[in-house]
Amino acid sequence: MSMTIDTREFRRAMGLFATGVTVITAQIGDEVHGMTANAVTSVSLDPLLVLVCIDRRARMASYIVEAGQFGINVLNAEQEHLSRHFAGRPNPELQIEFDDLNGVPVLPESLTNLACDVERVIDGGDHLVVFGRVIGMQTVLEPGEPLLYYAGGYKRLEQEELALAI
C-alpha cells in the first residue's frame, strides 16, 4: 500500500534532524558566491570525499559546476549573521572578507574550512548531489561553539558542567 506524504510535513520531519550550518563558497572569475547549506556530509576517508545537496533552482547549482571547486565553511555560533546573509537575506552593510585555501575562497574564523574539487554531480530529484574531493582543510585551534539548525531555527548547544565525584 502506497502512502501519500505531504512535502511540507516531510520537510518539517527532516527538520527535526539537528545539523550544523555551513556556507558553501565558489568563485567565478573575480566574484565569490556563497550559499547557506545544512545538507552536507562526509562520504569517504580514502579518498577524502564530502557531499553537498543543492537545490537545482539555486544560483549556486550552476556556479559550483562552472567553478569546478567549492569551499565548505562550518560556521560557529557567532556567525549566524553570515548564515542569514548567504541564505537569501543579504545585508548590504556587511563587508565580507574571504581567505584563500588552495585557490578556493573560504570564510575566516569558521570552525573548519574545506577546499574541494568537484568530483561528480548526480541527480538528486529537485536537488543536485555534488561530491567533492577534499584538497585542503583548516580548522581553528580552539574549537568554539557550533551554529546549529533544528526545527526551522538556529540553536546553540547547552553544555552542562560535569561534576566529578571524588
Image (cartoon, rainbow, N blue to C red):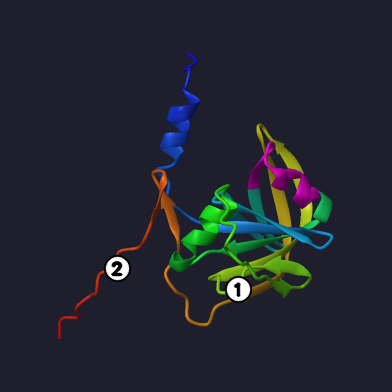
Q: Is residue 85 left or right of residue 10?
A: right
Do the CB atoms of the residues marked 2 and 1 lie less than 8 Å apart? no
According to the picture, the residue beneath numbered tag 1 turns out to be 108
Residue 6 percent coordinates (x, y):
47, 23
Disc 2 to disc 1, how far (Cα)? 25 Å
Q: Does the rendering let one see residue 43? A: no
Give the mark nearest the N terminus, 2 or 1.
1
Question: Element at badge 2?
Answer: loop
The segment highlighted magenta reads 53-65
**Residue 44 shows up from this direction:** yes
Element at label 1: loop
Task: Estimate the x, y position of residue 123 in percent, counting from the top left.
Answer: 72, 36
- Residue at image position (25%, 69%) is 160
Farthest-out residue, left: 166
Q: Is residue 51 left or right of residue 162?
A: right
Residue at 47% of width from left, 13% of height from top? 1
Query: What is the number of the mark on residue 159?
Result: 2
Residue type at mark 1?
A: Pro
Q: Is residue 37 above or below residue 29?
A: above
> Which amino acid type is shown beneath numbered disc 2?
Gln
